Amino acid sequence: MKSKKIKSLLYYLLSLFLFLAFVFPFIIIIINSFKDNLSVVRNPLALPEVFSFSNYIQAFNAMNFISALKNSLIVTIGSSLLIIVFSSMLAYFLVRWKWKVNRFIFLLLVMSMIIPFQSLMIPFVSIYGRLGLLDSKYVLMFYYLGFGLSLATFIYHGFIKNIPFELEEAAIIDGASRLQVFWKVIFPILKPITSTVLILDVLWIWNDFLLPSLVLVSAEERTIPLSTFSFFGTYTNNYGLAMAGLVLAIIPIIIFFLILQKHIVRGVVEGAIK
Amino acid sequence: MYHEKKISERLKVFGLFGFIPLLVFFLVMIVPFVIGILMTVTTWTGLTGSLFEFIGFKNFINAFSDPNFGSSLVATFKYVVYTLVLTNVLGFGLALLVTQGRKGQEFFKLSFFTPNLIGGIILGFIWQFIFSRAFVSVGVELGWGIFSVSWLANPETALWTLIIVSVWQSSGYMMLIYIAGLMGIDKSLMEASLLDGASAFKQLVKVKIPLMIPSFTISLFLTLQRSFLVYDTNLSLTDGGPFRSTELIAMHIYQEAFTYQRFGEGQAKALVLFIIVALIAVTQVGIMKKMEVEA
């Protein structure tokens, strides 16, 4: 009995220690986001003497937070929808039409997954910069479609393979077109996979920095990671203000996580295992 | 399965389902990949120069004779090895910890995963403050030598700050993959091994770990990819410094191309990176597939 209690105590001590190791950076930046610069420099670990939101107001304006949030939402949602629509259709096409070329296309998609973005970015910027196809968040969505297509198609492909063809036959007899069969019969069955793909892509695109930093040049097109980067660069030495900016940048994704935590955990695991 | 007979009908099906995604894929991945190879062996930069002026392997020779490239590769390998081992050991440990069936474990699980939600740029800035201000203040206050100087100021410790942040960021993700693996183990096998008198530790080494090789394959693959290509955290935490000592390979390529405008040489380095990543990934998955055992 006694050893059981000790075990339990040890378990919670260890968990608590690890918990603190994982969250203390967040706690420290939150504490300091309420302080003025002098008190941050004096002691970064002390609690603020007065809670002042002035850092937040200033950071909110300096980061152009509303504009950055709007850009991030447009890019993330738009790109994810493009990826879902086109990769599910492509995967369906590759599974249901057994053309010889389709096996080659599938192989090409799978092989392309190993190419790192860093190995493409120099020619990518050269070509599309020259063609004037940078600096627009709408063009950026199509780049995300290109970079995100192969993984999403691969995930959908694995699932559609196992959907029996008989399900579609009834719809065909009723005179449905190929597109109708896909959208009315197949796409609804794909719902769990769609939510996996959606979560993987939202987390990737929302946080992505390198691609948008190369594509989006003007200040009004900046997404949250880009505006955080330029904001922090400008106010590095005004610690309280910089910390408030970081907290603001984190809030949207934390809200997203709190609402959808179960789905996110499941989506991340399934996306990795596939 | 569908079989359209007429060419026109086949084209229609392709147009409906495959044309747009494959066109975008072609333009965004295949074209830059092919042009990237051409860029390294001709004077063409995609912008100026001639596509037909073949210069051989000059760019590759220049790349390998650049001492900064060598030192960046060495730093990257060091970073990858430590990050790989520590992330997976910690991730596996956390997975064991939160699958004990105790109260509150869901809460701990979610909090270990949280750093994964946030982009590397923001995490790097957070830790820059922690290392340069918070730890230093603790060090000075308590007289602890190891903390009293910012770890970011010294080349040796600066690389470790990157390793620490990456392990802190990724281990919660790997934990989720290991949890899925642990849940997939047949309960009757665990009971059988307990009946055989196996200790908890023996059970872990003899039963759990061998059955979880697929989870290790995935986690190691993901950690390898992530750590070889890390850029965001590198940029916001150390910016390659001090004295370019923590300029990992992705950042080195970025600098080469976009700061020093050496496109051909930069792309040669980028292709070397691609070959390294591809070879390691194929070898790793190949070896681990052989290790998988049937339950």
Image: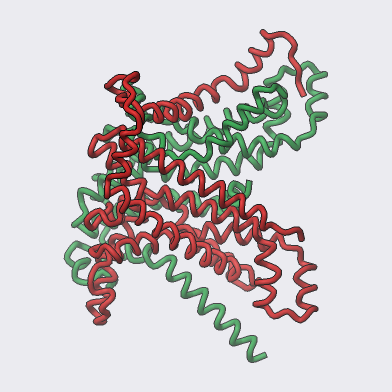
Chain colours: A green, B red
Residue B193 sits in quarter: bottom right
Residue B178 sits in quarter: bottom right
Q: Is residue A107 left or right of residue B1?
A: left
Residue B104 % position (x, y): 58, 70
Whether A120 is drawn above or below A251: the answer is above
Residue B140 % position (x, y): 22, 77
Q: Is residue A93 left or right of residue A252?
A: right
Residue A189 sits in quarter: top right
Q: Is residue B199 left or right of residue A128?
A: right
Residue B139 % position (x, y): 26, 76
Whether B200 is drawn above or below A103: the answer is below
* Front in this rendered view, residue B62 or B234: B62
Q: Quadrant of the N terminus of chain B?
A: top right
Q: Residue at x 34, y 20 (%)?
A: B51
Residue A29 % position (x, y): 32, 62
Q: Is residue B88 left or right of residue A247?
A: right
| Direction left: furthest residue | A38
Q: Quadrant of the C terminus of chain B?
A: bottom right
Q: Can residue B102 be seen from the camera position used here?
A: yes
* Front in this rendered view, residue B178 or A100: A100
Q: Residue at x 63, y 46 (%)?
A: A274
